[in-house]
Amino acid sequence: MQSAGAPAVQFRVVLHDPHAHLYRITMRVENPQAQQTLQLPTWIPGSYLVREFAKHLQNLRAGQNDQPVALTQLDKATWRADCQANAALEVQYEVYAADQSVRSSWLDASRGFFNGTSLFLHALGHAHLAHGLTIEATSYALDWQVATALPAEHIDGAGFGSYLAPDYDTLVDCPVELGNVWRGHFTVGSTPHRFAVSGAAPSFDGQRLLADAEKICTTCMAFWHGTEPPPIEHYLFLLNAVDDGYGGLEHRNSTALIAGRRDLPRRSDGAGGAWKPGEGYTTLLGLISHEYFHTWNVKRLRPAEFERYDYAQENYTQLLWFFEGFTSYYDDLLLVRAGVLEHAAYLKRLTKTINQVLQTPGRLIQSLAQASFDAWVKYYRQDENTPNATVSYYTKGALVALCLDLTLRREGHSTLDAVMRALWTRCKAGPMREADLLTALEDLGGRSYAAEIAAWVHSTEELPLAELLAAHGVRLQADTPQWAQRLGMRIATGEELRIKSVLRGGLAERAGMAAGDEWLGIETAAGAWRLQRLDDLALYAPQGTREVVALVARDRRLLRLPLQIPQDGTAPADTVLLQLSDTALAAHWLSGD
């Protein structure tokens, strides 16, 4: 029988074979149902793609009363155990963990990391009951430490031992980092915040990162609650520093981050001089801000469709433009308010966001609501036609937030800040529908904003960016586009001049260029020339040249494609520049006044 206070489901994780990237998991269900169903999630909340975690599960077997129990596979990730009720069921299996991303699991001889969605079977009917987790140390990991936001029950000084979650959702929403981690901490109000950093270089300046993160978290906490107590008792940042990588995934009381090792702050530049933060570090701070803002906006205030996750299939919503887009609006804006990003630098980053949207022909094909619903098959499954068929609910969603904020401020009734806090109260920090946003906008803005939401979210109309920015001291003006924008293409990174995407209606499409083509050179009246980069066009096809022959390799064939060269005034108006025209006026918006 289950003892008082013992978890209904218990998992034991052993770092089984680091060279084979294998975790060994033992699952014990104290009071199973007869014919108990077990299921591994197919996706992880916050990353809207079916990832088929079951493909990495192997050697699954079960037993009860010291006797083997037959398992029948029902589908790709579901099994039925031929067991009796009310006698403990023990299940053992292994999981291959070789994904360095924040979405799955990793294990080698120097580091471990896992999300519960990729490791822990779900005992159907038991999700609402307490789940325990025991993480066992092994001989090669004696100097490792464990970092997780799970509530500890009985652990040693390194964090190995047992943890207890009130339910399955909490268990799988707390990622675990294992290894030789750098640790740091700070407090916001009365809430402790911890950092666990893996893979940093010896020059890593952890104190600088903590100081800047503390400013961001303090600003974000005040944004949502002022001086009121927050809904979190503690928070954990897990940061994996790699040679080349970037990403983050939000969780209720923690986040998992990946950043380039060179982008982390350093104690010196190697020559005794002071380290100067670059664009990469600013981007990392923006990522920290983004994932921390999600603590409120998507992990608590969330789409009504996400009130209870269905881990077995896609969970559709039309509101990702709000939960990801609005978070993308505030991530950099809160850097300004926290004092870690200057106004000019912020406008440079906002310019980049605007240009990303303007240079996406798919914005005229797909609405933001559609983009949100189709995330499972479009945003997370990008290909060469993605820019022509879809729009990012991150970038355009951020611009919708900008337009709403500037409209509210111009009309003088309220701000988007106040709307976000009103939604938090109205929805009781829980499920939200679009109707709730419309009600909050009308209550605080003094009129209906249904027409704006219909035009900006549910249609493909262009956003009134220039008009609204001008009313707040920022001038939006046309800028000289790069060759890729002028020709209507995107180029893949690498030594070859290879076309990644051909944009709808552009000169490259008219010439017959295609994604995957290697652009070798051009022929002009002055001869044939080899191209190394797109900027070479200005060298070999000087101003006034109206057409060249593009020499392209496709499927081992050499093609000669007549390509028009854009003249002054004929390039698409998809590249803009933001400039301050009224510093004091802009400061009211940027500072949150």
Image (spheres, rainbow, N blue to C red):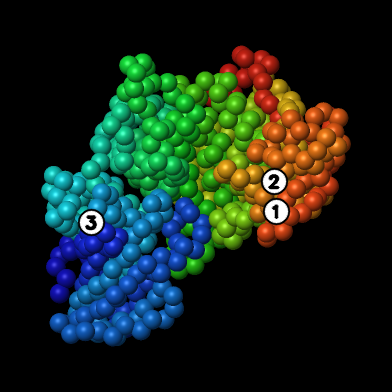
Label 3 sits on a secondary structure element that is strand
- The span from disc 2 to disc 1 (Cα, nearest Å) is 7 Å
Q: Residue 86, located in which quarter of the rendered image? A: bottom left
In x, y percent, where is residue 415? 59, 30
Q: Which residue is mark 3?
A: 164
Q: Residues within 10 Å of mark 3 (few under 14, many from 20)?
A: many
Query: What residue is drawn where x is 77% and y is 54%?
Result: 559
Give, as a three-letter code, the residue at label 1.
Ala
Of all residues, the one furthest to the front in this rendering is: 527
Could you tell me which quadrant the N terminus lies in?
Answer: bottom left
**Residue at 71%, 22% in the rendered image:** 475
Q: Quick one: label 2 or label 3, which is nearer the N terminus?
A: 3
Label 2 vs label 3, nearer the camera: 2
Disc 3 marks a residue whose amino acid type is Leu
Residue 520, disc: 2
Q: Which residue is mark 1?
A: 553
Q: Earlier in the sequence, mark 3 or mark 1?
A: 3
Residues at discs 2 and 3 in contact (Cβ within 8 Å): no
Q: Is residue 235 visible?
A: no
